[in-house]
Image: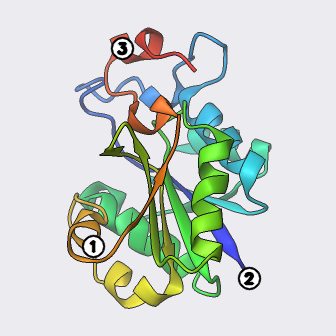
């Protein structure tokens, strides 16, 4: 199987709502979609298969993503950090040739950016990262050659250490969405597609 999209949607969003009552992924954006729905739609527009990783007892996020056509899997130890979700997703999709990891709280990434990263991987890059005005953003694509390092990840840094120590193909894009995540209520209205 080729590249699979992985939507990491298992975070708690504590900066958005420290009490944990309101899930930022379910908040509506100005155009009407929930944050995680907009994030998933971008991936689904560019990839035939998208696996969404959600945390336990997060039925609303899981149901919303399943309704869009995502394959939903629950990461039992999601609270231990982003690496747990990454590793869970990789173990769930071990038969693929590459992964494109996107964040559930980044709804403004454009499908053209996803396609650019996929093209870089198809052309032989082992890691592809988008850049906007020289700054790296998300999502990030990895070829299967990084399987052992990805499976060894721990904590809440995701794959940052791999990106810092191994060759990366930077794909310049005109997509400020690669820098825009939803961390606060202000972010819901201050970013625009």
Q: Which residue is mark 2?
A: 1
Mark 1, secondary structure of its residue = helix
The residue at which mark 1 appears reads as 162
* Label 2 SS: loop
Marks counted in the figure total 3
Label whose residue precedes the other's in the sequence (1 or 3): 1
Dot 2 or dot 1: first in sequence order is 2
Marking on residue 192:
none
- In this rendering, the answer to whether 86 lies above or below 82 is below
The residue beneath circle 3 is 185
Q: Residue at x 24, y 28 (%)?
A: 15
Disc 2: CA contacts within 10 A as few (<14), some (14-19) or many (>=20):
few
Q: Name the spot of residue 31 as percent of width and height, x first.
A: 66, 13
Residue drawn where x is 64% and y is 87% of the image: 95
Closer to viewer: mark 2 or mark 1: 1
Residue 151 locus on image (x, y percent)? 36, 82
Q: Nearer the viewer, mark 1 or mark 3?
A: 1
Which one is earlier in the sequence, the residue at label 2 or at label 3? 2
The residues bearing labels 2 and 1 have C-alpha atoms spaced at a distance of 24 Å
At numbered mark 3, what does the secondary structure look like: helix, strand or loop? helix
The image shows residue 120 at horizontal and vertical percentages of 58, 67
Q: Residue at x 40, y 30 (%)?
A: 180
The answer to whether 117 appears left or right of 1 in the picture is: left
Q: Residues within 10 Å of mark 1 (few under 14, many from 20)?
A: some
The alpha-carbon separation of the residues under discs 1 and 3 comes to 31 Å
């Amino acid at each position: 199987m080729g590249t699979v999209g992985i939507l990491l949607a298992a975070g708690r969003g504590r900066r958005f709502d420290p009490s944990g009552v309101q899930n930022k992924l379910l908040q509506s954006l100005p155009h009407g979609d929930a944050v995680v729905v907009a994030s998933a739609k971008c991936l689904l527009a560019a990839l035939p298969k998208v696996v969404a990783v959600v945390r336990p007892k997060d039925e609303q996020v899981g149901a919303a993503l399943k309704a869009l056509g995502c394959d939903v899997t629950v990461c039992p130890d999601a609270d231990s950090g982003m690496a747990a979700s990454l590793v869970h997703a990789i173990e769930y999709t071990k038969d693929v040739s590459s992964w494109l990891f996107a964040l559930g709280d980044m709804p403004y990434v454009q499908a053209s950016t996803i396609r650019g990263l996929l093209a870089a991987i198809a052309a032989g890059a082992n890691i592809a990262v988008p850049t906007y005005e020289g700054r790296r953003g998300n999502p990030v694509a990895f070829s299967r050659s990084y399987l052992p390092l990805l499976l060894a990840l721990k904590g809440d840094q995701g794959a940052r250490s791999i990106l810092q120590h191994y060759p990366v193909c930077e794909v310049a894009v005109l997509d400020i969405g690669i820098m825009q995540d939803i961390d606060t209520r202000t972010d819901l209205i201050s970013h625009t597609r």
